[in-house]
Image (cartoon, rainbow, N blue to C red):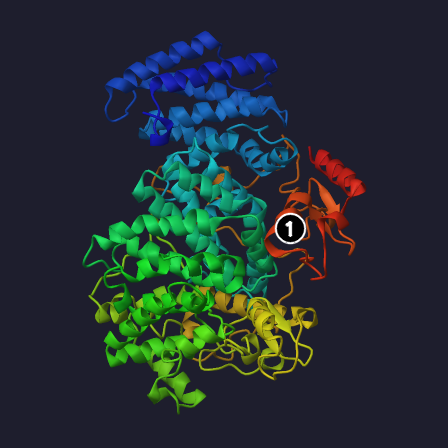
Amino acid sequence: MAAADFAYSAQDVAQALARLSQVTAARGLVFAEGTPAVLDAQDIQARWQHIATVAGGAGDGTLDPVTLEHLRAIYNHIEAVIISCGAPDAFDVYEACFECLSKAGLFLPGLQSRQLLLQVLEDVHEVYDVLLSCVETYEWVQPGATGMLRLWMMQILFAGLGCTTITGRDLMELTDNDVCGAISLIAFIIKCEQAPYEMQAAAGRCLVELTTADCVFFQQTDSEETNTQQITKLTAMLNRHVNGLIRGIIQFEIVEAFGHCICQHQLTHARTDVIVKNFMTTIHNCLCYCSENQKKLRQHLATQSTIVQDIMVPYVYNILPALFDKAHCGPNDVEWQNMKSVLQTFVVVTFNINVFRPQLRDSDLLCKVCEVPNILAHISMLELIIKILINVDYVKGPHAELLLATMHGAFERLPQESRDRLQRRMCSEQGIRLPYSRSAAQAVQSLAWVLTPPAGDAGQTTEEKKARRKNNWRSSKNKNRKRKRMFGMQKTGKAGAAEAVPFLGTEEGDQEGESEDDEDDMPPLMPAENWEASLGQTDETGVPSMAKCQLTGGLMHDPVRTPDGYLFERAVLEDWVLVNHSNPLTGQPLQPLEIASATDVASFIQGYQLQMLSACTIAPEAFDEPLQPEVAAPTPAVQMPAAAPIAPASPSGMASLGDLPSLQKEQPSPKSRKEKAKIRITSRSVVDCPDDMRCALDGKVMTSPQRSPYGHCFEKKTLEKWVMNCGSICPITQQPLRLEDCQPDAEMKKRIVKFLKGQA
């Protein structure tokens, strides 16, 4: 079978062994004393022919003792080559060795052969771990220098332990809890055309897991060591993880990697469903974080990717026929689940990035979406469509009248209880739901009938609203699942698809079948002391008042401050000022240059958000009842430490290849890690390069630095794309800036080249 089918023939293994003999002879390796017996090329091929003959006749993969000894001899030879190589740049030798191990392991699926393979991996785990950590450095200095080494190294694990078994936490531990290193491996697998689809789907799922707080902490909530950790320490750990995560997604071009993968599997509908789901969930979750790198991610999506026009919009058009053909389609269908993921991502993207709005406003995409059977009867989908309409300012588009009539008709057809729930979702819970812009005044006014609170809620006090939410939360049946969805975060199942939800029809399906999105999807947050001094009192949803935009009411991710002290979400205020030239609250004149970043408030919001995610993961019981005095309270803001604590290895995870699980039922005690002496290259050294060597716009290491008159350095191509999309304005200072005003920085380029060469 072909490589894409995750299987190999005996001839494939024989060719890999022949290549190993060639590269070994070309290198002239000197084998160290005490290494297993070394075989010549003819002996290797003869032994393999015997193994292939026996394995071909044994349907269950069982090998007799003689054949097993032949296989052990070949594996011992490969182990001797790996240990004796020693040269840090001998990637052709390492690639040939791990290719042989990978292909032979897949060809021989029996228990005995797998035990031999895992034993070899444990014996060479020192070399394996260091190779995995330094390979990206060599790729930066010389792209393509390592060939397919990462594919074969990772394929052994994915095939030997199972694609559904590997988790994002495992990849973190394989890279010494370096999130950028884990993302580097994921990006390579996703964009590698030789990688089997099963590996690519598993890698996408692992990336989604890395965007959640679960991968940072233990999964076992009864672990005494975890629950006794200080909440501030765990928050700092999550802070470091989130910032590294978003930086790695930009650094290793995850968007481009998913684009290649989708194109590779575009003829297989079932495969693209899984890949797109993982991609959408990753982008959605990253944009929901209030992180110092979130702004850079928005700039990256706006200037260096075409995900909306090239991936998201075409995908929606492709799955619409499948939805149209199902008269009773609903949340249980994978197409429905993916449509919902796309709409959620559209809401977040159109709220933050104005470049994408005209593409959705001027096309008939939203009109087509509204024609999907049952979609307008589910208030969760109706909410997403309305928010997209507001964010793109649909009244300026060619389909405004049709969309308005469609929304109004759908609202009128809902039962009164569902209308109240939809109105409540749209206007009273902006702190925890996906945001929509209030700056599109005409769009907001045209949809005012759904943006007003229900009649019964108008006179409720904050305390009454808190009590109502708390009672509803206590009566919920799915607490555990809901706890993991704070701040609009999404998760994905083991197979990459969304969790299946029973389809109960129209209104009932919204009320129960889609319970994860009902109006009480988030419990009252854990009360936190010392936050009032920085962010003010919390509202009925548990969100501090100063953490919310004073125009939209949504949790801010990039807060800015006006000269008179008002706080707004940057994207919302910039949209408003460009049209109205005034402060939306006071009516006083306001210009874009007068808006200043509120970095102090952003730090408080980030600490608050990450603290809540940390507390919900390690102490979910605290969200059922008010916080007891013995639970530690966090500090107002969590600053990123110089050396943040590293998450302890999970008892069930893999801290290195030396800790690979045994195929026996009994789990051996983990081996203590030995000092790595074969290859001494600092892990992720390129990723951790000095900040002044990074482009001020996208955060990547520069290869052709250009310095602006204001003193900032940009990558040449990045700056050109910014000017083409956003105009002649500096992305940092917002001052006028033309390309001809920027000059090449030769001294900086010399420093970067010297730094990169020094890593080799």
Q: Is residue 541 above or below residue 398?
A: below
Residue in the picture at 69% in, 40% down: 703
Residue 316, horizontal then vertical, whole percent = 35, 52
Residue 504 percent across, percent down from the top left? 20, 65
Q: Does residue 409 appear in the picture of this structure? A: yes
The correct choice, above or below, for 640 with respect to 325 in the image is below
Q: Residue at x 71, y 49 (%)?
A: 739
Q: Position of residue 622 (x, y in %)?
A: 44, 73
Q: Residue furthest top?
A: 42
> Which residue reaches farthest front?
398
Q: Quadrant of residue 537?
A: bottom right
Looking at the figure, which quarter contains the N terminus? Answer: top left
Q: Quadrant of the C terminus?
A: top right
Q: Looking at the picture, does residue 390 appear above or below residue 313?
A: below
* Displayed quadrant of residue 498: bottom left
Identify the secondary structure beneath mark 1: loop
Image-based side of 351 in relation to 419, left or right: right
Give amino acid for label 1: Gly
Image coords of residue 466 (percent x, y): 41, 84
Q: Foreground: 129 or 756?
A: 756
In the picture of the structure, the residue carrying the numbered disc 1 is 699
Q: Nearer the viewer, residue 720 or 138?
A: 720
Q: Residue at x 39, y 46 (%)?
A: 275
